[in-house]
Amino acid sequence: MNRFDWLSELLARFQDEHILLYKGSAVVLAPAHTLNVDSEDWASCAAQTKKYRCRFSALWAQQLDDELQLNACYEKQGDYLVLRTKIPLDKPLIHSITPHYANADRPERHCHDMFGIEFKKQPDNRRWSRHKAWQANQYPLRKDFPVAGFNTGLTPPDNDYPFLSVQGSGVYEIPVGPVHAGIIEPGHFRFQAVGEMVLNLEQHLGYVHKGIEKIAEGRDAHRVVKLAARVSGDSCVSHAWASCLAMEKAALCQVPPRAVWLRALMAERERVANHLGDIGAIANDVAFGFFFYQFGRLRETWQRLSQALFGHRLMMDCLVLGGVTQDINQQQIDEILRQIKMLRKEWRELKTVFNENTSLEDRLETTGILSPDYAQRLGCVGYVGRASGQDFDVRRDLAYAPYNKLQVKSPCYNRGDVAARTLVRLNEIQSSLDLIEQICQNLPTGEIQTPWQTPKAGAEGLGFIDGWRGEIVVYVRFAEDNKIDRFFPRDPSWLTWPALEHLIRGNIVPDFPVCNKSVNGSYSGHDL
Amino acid sequence: MLKILTKVIKTGVVTEKFERNADLERFGIEIKTLVDKQFAGSLSIRAVDVGSCNGCELEIHALNNPYYNIERFGVHFVASPRHADALLVTGVVSRHMETALLRVYEATPAPKFIIAMGDCAVNGGEFGVSYASCGAVGNVINVDVAIPRCPPPPLAVMQAILQFLKT
Ligand code: SF4
């Protein structure tokens, strides 16, 4: 299969629909292909890409002088297409693509709250990222909005978000959050239930909106990499990697092969650490403490080796522009391989317990089902998608370096229940261990960093990485003097949070924690 | 069941490993004595994320893994501020969480103390003050103890609790 062998057919379909295409480019945002279109054709393009079974991946805007540029990223067979259009800043009006792609709903509402873009025929025009920290007629990502210093006094609670309401005898509401009962990030969940059964769940997120996109602007690129690592701390390696990739593309920087392989080593270690922790936590939510302590123990030993190897338990700030900060020697490689051998043995024992334990089976199977059909419509990625038949893995399908030289086995199931999501993660641990072994055995020699060259103002880049939650997309555009003009990190959680609203329906309220944990969306990564 | 029991027996008590780690044991025991004195044998902590990146939360979770097992010193994480003696606050205070933090603070019965965990909570970290963030926790409520680093490792969190209780 050749890269982009589908693109000419899609372009022909665009032409059949009389969609005017302007000069595109295969290099500006490589590996993605960019196409410029008229704003009037924005929604009809989406209708065509949808028909042609392209998956919606990301949507972002940016202000370029007195215009707003809108970007929509679609994916098919591991190839990415970015459609771009411009609308005037004083009349920012465009047709919504949500009628074609349900998962463009929240990204569009985010664009509205941050830029003031009006999306015509958007089925849900409620605010999303804005609570009460700024007014409805203020748009933080516009260039004339000050990054700080304009709010005074206490920010009132967001107590009038227009939730969907359900009526009928015996129906009641359960408001949960923003502060939850466990050690977990804040967000609000509004349940409508009858007896124990959940009729509907609505999420209201945005509580940990820290202005990441805005504060990155005007910051030095090196510091924005640090900021990227903190978009979602559990994914600090993969987010930093995606941002580095985007910036390195903009600067035409060639990262030494050894550094690229070390990045992958860290990313796989991050994946294993998170899966270990979450499998324990999922089990804990159904009162199976044995797994909680066993997997917690394994995660701790894993994190300790990360500390010994890279000087940080989460490997934060180990990626920098042009490479990585830490090299490893043969002795450390042996240690990594030794730990993998031990972990494999323990994994087999625990996997047998997982397979045979009837109480786990009882609680996890048929709980929180996300059908492959829904997963496809919502464009779910990562383990949420792969537990529901969406066989997509950026490492395998885009095959960015070094995965183009590695054998990526990506487990996929169709059942879509909590058990399937747990199983994907159990098996991903195995395939990550395989990958780490391959990396250790084939680690190229050479430098781990190359000097950074400041790109010229206006240079832009796009980075795609498969984080442990799934596909991460990062867009950057440079200003003068190595400063960042626009930073847009798209966490995979944008595509999996909506799945939770669907898969919880018809389940009992007490199963919500385990369903939530099995999806484990990032609040911070989503709220930005 | 047999497999579980075998695994439990084979694993043994990993917490014991730290008997050789003088620091943790010493600090741990000190925590226990001090907690005993001030909070009658149990210190209830409510973790509140007001704008963290979730990195700090991961390390709070680690406190409950068998290696640190903070519960053995009478330190518990509770589900409501109403049950708490201390708040362990992570993250910069996002403006969207400002009122929530104040409400949690008010809901916590006195005597209470506030621990700011992580660079964000201590000094604003990489996020600082902006249209969306009030910055450090100290900008919103009084902080009694600060645990810097990003994120502070579990051992540092235990040590900090101890230091605070000493004063
Ligand atoms: S201190 Fe570091 S780990 Fe903790 S919330 Fe802030 S950025 Fe995340």
Image (cartoon, rainbow, N blue to C red):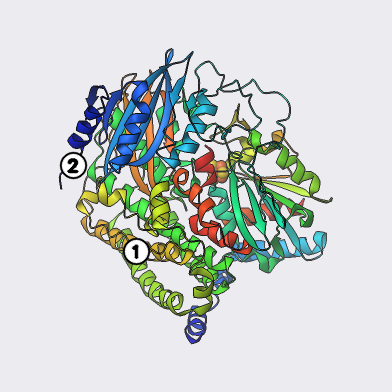
Q: Is residue A183 visible?
A: yes
Which residue is labeled 1 in the image?
A335
**Residue A288 pos. (x, y %):** 56, 73
Q: Measuring 44% from the left and 64% from the top, which residue is drawn there?
A: A422
Q: Which mark is residue A3?
A: 2
Q: Is residue B150 visible?
A: no
**Residue B137 pos. (x, y %):** 68, 38
Asked if A383 appears above or below A280 in the picture, the reply is above
Q: Is residue B2 left or right of residue B94?
A: left
Q: Amino acid at mark 2?
A: Arg
Q: Is residue A29 left or right of residue A270?
A: left
Q: Of residues A386 and A20, which is closer to you in this image?
A: A20
Label 1 and label 2 in one chain:
yes
Labels 1, 2: front one = 2
Q: Measuring 48% from the left and 37% from the top, which residue is drawn there?
A: A105
Give the structural element (helix, strand or loop) at label 1.
Answer: helix
Residues marked 1 and 2 touching at CB (< 8 Å): no
Q: Is mark 1 within 8 Å of ligand 1?
A: no
Q: Measuring 48% from the left and 70% from the top, which residue is drawn there?
A: A365
Parent chain of label 1: A
Marked residue nearer the N-terminal end (1 or 2): 2
Q: Which mark is residue A52?
A: none
Give the structural element (helix, strand or loop) at label 2.
Answer: loop
Q: Is mark 2 within 8 Å of ligand 1?
A: no
**Residue A341 pos. (x, y %):** 33, 70
Q: Residue furthest front?
A: A168
